[in-house]
Image (tube, helix red, strand yellow):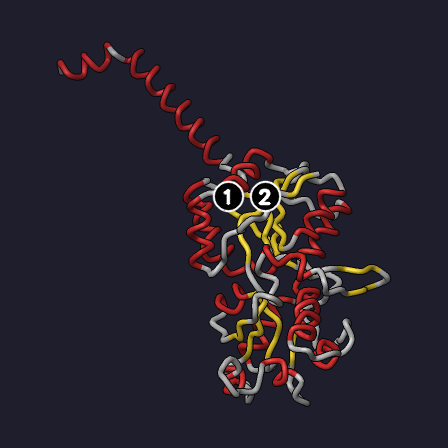
Amino acid sequence: MKIFATLASRRPVTAVWFTFCIVLAGAGATAAASPTPPLDVAYAGAMGAVMERAVRPAIARELGTELRGRAQGALGLANLIAAGGLQPDVFIAVTPAPMRIVIAAGKTTRAIPFARTEMVIAYSPRSRYAAAFARAGQPDAEPWWRILTTAGLRFGRTDPRTDPQGLNIIFTLELAADYYRQPGLAARILGPAENPRQIFDEPDVMARLQAGQLDASSAYKIQATAFDLPYVALPAAINLGDAALADRYRRATVTLDGRTFHPQPLVFYAAALAAAPHPALAARFVQWLGGARARAIFARYHYDGPGGAKPLER
């Protein structure tokens, strides 16, 4: 009875405490309903493996947000962003050209380099030419470029109008023609620049290689390793992976729709966009990409550091 009397005498305090708990519960519900917004990132399709397998969980842990990615050819993404048809928080491109489109359109003012890769020739382990490709670097073996000229060999690549890699394989083979003294080599392997028998969407190329529907394809080194596909490494003089050889690479040219293009080293750039839906989060992510933790992740996925590449600015 004494206990009940004590509780009864404290009823006003209990009522106040009950009200306070309701307020706290309401505040907690409000916080739960308003989590950190997701981060929308449009990135070069070749980066799919590292972005989905490693960067996404790292961002969840370190920035406390969900990364929502759109993987596509970087030139196509750049044109969509420049035209206002796509408005992500961050854009990531390979080579300066797509990023310069976005900068020229006023969608960002600065992009940082954070990684690089190189061109390789990936091949299917199911291909009847797999053994020949595996021996291609050995003395007295048939060279990789000659194997690619074999009648009936199924070669895959991406569209040079929308994807930098589609341009880069043409540049690589133009440089190879000079390097190996094989005039007309690019045309013998690729046919016309726009060859519908060879051109597929970027993810489709790797899938067709794995399935054995293609014998070989153009690829970035990071793609071949991500899909556990064997590849032929190419000399630095033609693989577009050495920033110190930028002037040499520029000897190659490709003309599409009346415009002339020159190759650039395969450096990846990231930029927070001016109209980013979540600007503070976008800036934090770009800063994270330039840091030590991101470098360690990219190194595990066979990306090289950016070397001497400089930021791109308006």
Location of mark 2 (residue): 112
Residue 177 or residue 222, whichever sits in front: 177
Q: Is residue 28 above or below residue 161?
A: above
Residue at 45%, 32% in the rendered image: 29
- Rate crowding at label 1 as few (under 14), some (14 to 19) or many (20 or more) other CA atoms within 10 Å: some
Percent position of residue 314, x then y: 71, 38
Measure how far apart labels 2 and 1 are at the Cα level: 8 Å
Q: Quadrant of residue 261?
A: bottom right
Give the vertical position of 50 relative to 3 (above or below).
Answer: below
Identify the amino acid type marked 1. Gly
Residue 253 sits in quarter: bottom right
Residue lying at 71% horizontally and 60% vertically, measured from the top left? 250
The answer to whether any part of residue 197 appears in the image is no
Q: Residue 63: where, in percent of width, then height?
A: 46, 40
User: Could you tell me which residue is drawn at 65 percent across and 79 percent down?
Assistant: 155
- Residue 207 visible: yes
Which residue is tagged 1? Answer: 290
Locate residue 297, reporting x and y percent.
44, 53
Identify the secondary structure beneath mark 1.
Answer: loop
Callout 2 touching callout 1 (CB < 8 Å):
yes
Q: Is residue 103 left or right of residue 22?
A: right
> Callout 2: helix, strand or loop?
strand
Residue at 71 percent across and 56 percent down: it is 75
Work out whether residue 128 or residue 176 is closer to the camera in this orientation and state it.
176
In this picture, residue 9 sits left or right of residue 305:
left
Q: Residue furthest left?
A: 2
